[in-house]
């Protein structure tokens, strides 16, 4: 069985500050891990995904996430927040090498303070 | 290239009525998925089509929900009769490669369903 826990349903950071969105996963088999973003009135868009090639994954808009097996974490970071980063972010997991569905977390809404 | 489109973007209906949601996947994508997000909760898988065949419908809540994909192109999701707990955002996604984990899913912007 697989699950995802996102810590904090709302996170606020000042413009220019570090963004850190936390995600912990549970998986009985090696996982694929994803971060999706949903901007207002738009669909979900893939930010980045971990597929075992490298533990530090770089995505679009300067976001990156690090897979830490020992901590079962896949936290999303960005060095400097921009107003346009205000959106809802979803962490997700699916089993590697198996045909199975993606399991999403509850989402974290990121607010950027001027 | 057009993305995944969903119609309508919003629907407000009364309990007991019927609603049909439509999803047009990206042209050439054999895989089509329906997901639902109830307010404040996670996005949950409903079902998966490969072309016109239902590959996995384990997430469908009950028999009030009926999904079809005639001809393997667009898909519809009908809720009949709608109940209050059916309210939420219904997302559709499509992909070329079967395994969800190995290929990027392209999502539509969702249909916000409100059952009063």
Image: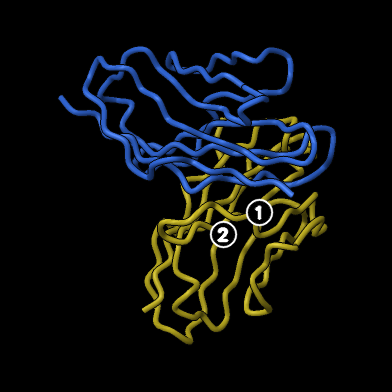
Chain colours: A blue, B yellow
Q: Label for residue B22? A: 2
Q: Secondary structure at mark 1?
A: loop
Within the image, what quadrant is residue B97 found in? top right
Seen at 39% across and 42% down, the residue is: A8
x, y percentage for residue A30? 77, 31
Answer with left or right where residue A92 lies relative to residue A88.
right
Q: Nearer the viewer, residue A30 or B20?
A: A30
x, y percentage for residue B11? 40, 67
Taking the view exactly as shown, the residue that stands out farthest to the left is A114
Question: Residue under mark 1: which chain is it in?
Answer: B
Q: Earlier in the sequence, mark 2 or mark 1?
A: 2
Q: Secondary structure at mark 2?
A: strand
Taking the view exactly as shown, the residue that stands out farthest to the front is A70
Q: Nearer the viewer, residue B43 or B8?
A: B43
Within the image, what quadrant is residue B13 found in? bottom left
Q: Nearer the viewer, residue A105 or B73?
A: A105
Answer with left or right where residue A87 lies relative to residue A63.
left
Dot 2 and dot 1 residues touching (CB under 8 Å): yes
x, y percentage for residue A106? 48, 48
Residue indicated by mark 1: B74
Q: Residues within 10 Å of mark 2 (few under 14, many from 20)?
A: many
**Marks 2/1: CA distance?**
7 Å
Within the image, what quadrant is residue B22 found in? bottom right
């Amino acid at each position: 069985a697989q699950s995802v826990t996102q810590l904090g349903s709302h996170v606020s950071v000042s413009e220019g500050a570090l963004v850190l969105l936390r995600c912990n996963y549970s998986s009985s088999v090696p996982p694929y891990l994803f971060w999706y973003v949903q901007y207002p009135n738009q669909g979900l868009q893939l930010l980045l995904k971990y597929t075992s090639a490298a533990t530090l994954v770089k995505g679009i808009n300067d976001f990156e996430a690090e897979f830490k097996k020992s901590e079962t974490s896949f936290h999303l970071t960005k060095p400097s927040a921009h107003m346009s980063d205000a959106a809802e972010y979803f962490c997700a997991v699916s089993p590697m090498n198996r045909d199975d569905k993606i399991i999403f977390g509850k989402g974290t809404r990121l607010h950027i303070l001027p | 290239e057009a993305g995944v489109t969903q119609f309508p973007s919003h629907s407000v209906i009364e309990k007991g009525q019927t609603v049909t949601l439509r999803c047009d996947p990206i042209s050439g994508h054999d895989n089509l998925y329906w997901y639902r997000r109830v307010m404040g909760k996670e996005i949950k898988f409903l079902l998966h089509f490969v072309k016109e065949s239902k590959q996995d419908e384990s997430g469908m809540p009950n028999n009030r929900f009926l999904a079809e994909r005639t001809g393997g192109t667009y898909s519809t999701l009908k809720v009949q009769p709608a109940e209050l707990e059916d309210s939420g955002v219904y997302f559709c996604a499509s992909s070329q490669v079967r395994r969800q984990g190995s290929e990027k899913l392209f999502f539509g912007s969702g249909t916000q369903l409100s059952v009063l």
